[in-house]
Structure formats: structure tokens, C-alpha cells
Image (cartoon, rainbow, N blue to C red):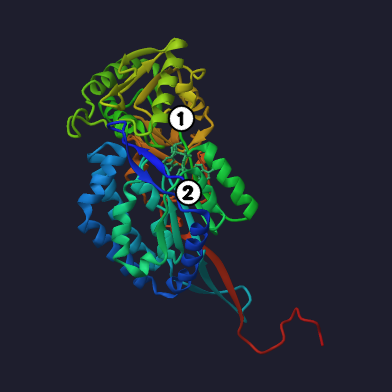
Amino acid sequence: MTKSIDVRNPRTGKFDYVIIPPPPKLLAQLCNRLRRSQVRWQQLSVEERIEALQEWKQAILSGRDRLTEALVNDTGRLSISEMEIDSFISSIDRWCRLAPELLQESAKNTAIPFIALQQTAVPYSLVGVISPWNFPLLLSTIDAIPALLAGCAVVVKPSEIAPRFVAPLMTALNAVPKLRDVFTFIEGAGETGAALIEYVDLVCFTGSVATGRKVAEVAAKKFIPVFLELGGKDPAIVLESTNLDLATSAILWGAVVNTGQSCLSIERIYVAESIFDKFVDQLVTKAQKLKLAHPTLETGELGPIIAEKQAAIISDHLLDALDKGAVIHCGGKVEELGGGWWCRPTVLTQVNHSMKVMTDETFGPIMPIMPFANVEEAIHLANDSIYGLSAAVFAGSEELALEVAQQIDAGGISINDAALTAIMHEGEKNSFKFSGLGGSRMGPAALKRFMRKKAFLIKTNSANDPWWFDN
Ligand code: NAD
């Protein structure tokens, strides 16, 4: 028997749900079964695979209330859970629309007139997806959907911290036998994630740098591709010419939506010193208007801190900053309400890069702001990080902002807006530095990650090739 895992409810602090990881033998059998079924799945036309995904989508929509309830219990938030479901549904539709063209095979002429080239691609058999707790539904399916359309079988191991959403998804999956044979979710913690890697041909991992490194090491030993989407410490640069009202509204959203529990949250703000005080005043005024979604889900905009371990990290970063001279303008502490952990939008000044709040991932609604004297200094500060996930640049003109953005070491940069990669998944981008490894999970390239290319080199004449031996 494997040991069951008790799951904490982020609003009440009570352990009111249990998951049971599959015993090792069962996991092996499950992966073998999926691998066998993948052969037929790959032989289906892309239109037939689309049909199966659309049937799953319909089954999910008809049980949407159960899925919403499960996600609310997983995360303690309502409107973001609704948004998460909408975004998941639209990503099924988007990939179903794009897949037929992306999976088209092509024949090409070559430099040698009597050799034709036929280019094709074959899917990896079994893909393993390991995902975090902050957007449980979205991040466990973001790679799975294109992988399935490419013709792979997929096993998802979501986070043990927010696993309730799996049950309604599995109920919907059971209504689509064709898809159920090649797609499943397993419950469990790190041990189960590590065990899964042993059975798959490709890994998509979303989570922390520390775990990502472990996953990459195992994948390297097995010579299997691994796509890592890891942490961030996204900077926002605000130049003197910026529309301050727009910048403060965008940055507030980008920093505190989902209580700051997003890899692409704005976690550091650099503001031109000539507008620093005005910027701080406006941001604080707007931040103070946001409320906690406590005692009811509808009371305010900010849900609880989902993972208890994260509440401790946020507190630690705040205490470290205060200890080193930071000044709090609003918010400023992690508090316990009704058994859950909560944090109000927090604005800090008098911060510097000796503080954890400016260097380590905080994953909370914390906005530390530093002034800069010139653009070179702003770029230097923004790049002074082990992370390179995304960033934001605000300026009076698009040209000026783009000029700065080009010098920032990050994959997705919002111009005169913040955290746009959360909303728009069309643009291809890589994670720089310790924020990740591997091809883009967004845009058309995302689907192609799941295929191995094959070239058929076809001789089209019956004469000897000029480079053969002369006999
Ligand atoms: P985590 O690394 O603790 O866990 C992520 C997943 O890995 C979980 O499912 C966990 O059970 C599993 N796991 C743990 N040990 C494992 C092992 N040895 N082998 C295989 N799997 C293992 O991360 P978390 O706390 O769940 O998530 C928060 C982190 O995720 C933050 O750093 C955040 O920035 C990052 N994140 C990144 C993105 C992105 O797209 N770049 C998106 C969301 C979250």
C-alpha cells in the first residue's frame, strides 16, 4: 500500500481531502497500457483526435459546476478559478484550430535534382507532465493538450497541494473512451513525480528551480527531452515619460492578481527617480482599495495564500527587508484569518539587491520599488537576477520602451502593460537563465516539441549516383 496524503484547504487550514498515490507496480502498468494505446491514437487522423478532445471539452462543460467547486477548494479563490476554466477551454479550442495546419507533412525539392525530400514527424509515445499548485488546472493541461493533438499519450502528475480538480476532469475523461485510453492524471507528491519520469519519453515540468534541476538530472541520465518552466522574479521598468495612471494600474494587476502567486508576477519595480514619489503615492492609493476575499469568496479581489510553505517564505522576505531598512507603505504582513494565510497588497521602498525580496522569488502580493538615475542603471538592475522569465517596460512611446526591452534578459516582455503572457499564449518565447529550459510552450512551436522529425530521402531516377564507386 502507498501512503495517502492529506490535503489542506487554503481558506480553512483544515486537511479535508485525501489523495492516494499509485503504488509503483500500478504506475508501471498504467504507463505501459497508455503506451500501447498510443499506437492507435497516433494512427488516427488529427481530425479524429480533435473530435475526442472536443467531446472531452463538452463533458467538462456539462460538469462545470463540480470543476469550479473543486478548484475553489484547491485555491480558495472564485473569479480566478472561473477565469482558469475559461482559459483552459479556449486553449482546447485554439489548439484544435491550429493543429491540422501544424501537423501537415511536406515534400520538398532538394539541391540534388534526383533526390526528393519528404519531411514528416512522429510523436513521442508517452509524455509526462508534472505541474505546480498555483494554477492547478491550467498548468497541468497547457502542455498536455498540444501533446495529445500531436499524437502522444500523456500522464499528468499535478501538485499534491491542489489536486481536487482532477476528479471532475477524470469523470469527464471517462465519458470519452478513445481519449481515456491515452490520457490520465495520477495523484501524488514528489516521489510519484520522480517515479513517473522513469516511464516516459519526454517530460514537461512546471515548478521551482530546485525541483526542476532534479528533474533535468534524471532526464539527462535517460537521454530524454525535458522542458522546464520554472520560477521568476519579473522586473518592471518605469521610464520618466510614462503615463503614470496606466503604469500603476497595470503593475498593480501584474503584481497582486492571484495574490502574487504567478511565476510571471511583477516582483520588482524600478522607477525613474524624477517620478518616484508620485508613482509610489499612486500605487499605494490604488493598492489600498483592494480587499481580501474574506470572509466570503466575493468579499474582495485577493484570495488566500494557497501553499502554507509559501506563507512562510513571504513572511521571511518581508522580515528580511524590514531588518535591512525597507519601509512599508501599505500591507506588510502575512496574517491568519479563519485558518487560512492572507497578505494584503504590500508596497515597499528603501529596498536594494541585498534583500531577498529583490532577489528571490517571493510569490506573494509584494511590490518593492527602487528608484533609478538613468536607463542604463534600470537595465542593469533588471538583469541583475538569476531569473529571466518575463518583464514589463513602461514609457511614453512604444519605440522607447522597445529599445529598453531589447536589452532585458527575459523571454516575454510586456510593453506598457504587465504580465501579458498570462493572457496571451500566441507568442513564442523561451525562459532565460534559471527560469527554464527547452523550446517555447507558447505559440505554434509548442506543439512541435512533441514530435521527432523524420526525413525520407528518396532517389527518383535509376541512374548511378555520381558519388558511388565506379563499378
Ligand atoms: P515544486 O517544484 O515544489 O513542485 C512542482 C511539482 O513537482 C509538484 O507536482 C511536485 O509534486 C513535483 N515534484 C516535487 N519533487 C519532485 C521530484 N523530485 N521529481 C519530480 N517531481 C517532483 O513547485 P511548486 O511549489 O508546486 O510551484 C511553485 C513554483 O512553480 C514557483 O517557483 C513558480 O514560479 C513555478 N511556476 C513556474 C511557471 C512557469 O511557467 N515558468 C508557472 C507556474 C509556476
382 sits left or right of 59 in the view: right
For image coordinates 32% across by 44% down, the residue present is 423
Q: Is residue 133 visible?
A: no
State if disc 2 and disc 1 touch (CB < 8 Å). Answer: no
Tell me if 88 is positioned left or right of 29 in this view: left
> Where residue 304 sits: x, y (%)?
30, 30
> Hey, what amino acid is under mark 1?
Glu
Residue 282 in the image: above or below residue 126 = above
Residue at the front extreme, as displayed: 1
**Residue at which label 2 appears:** 2
- Residue 132 is labelled as none
SS at mark 1 in the image: loop
Image location (x, y in percent) of residue 137: 34, 48
* Label of residue 361 in the image: 1
Q: Amino acid at mark 2?
A: Thr
- Asked if disc 1 is less than 8 Å from ligand 1, the answer is yes
Q: Position of residue 292 (x, y in %)?
A: 23, 27
Residue 318 visible in the snapshot: yes
- Percent of width and height locating residue 97: 32, 63
Q: Single out the residue that lies furthest toward the bottom.
A: 462
Q: Nearer the viewer, residue 99 or 130?
A: 130
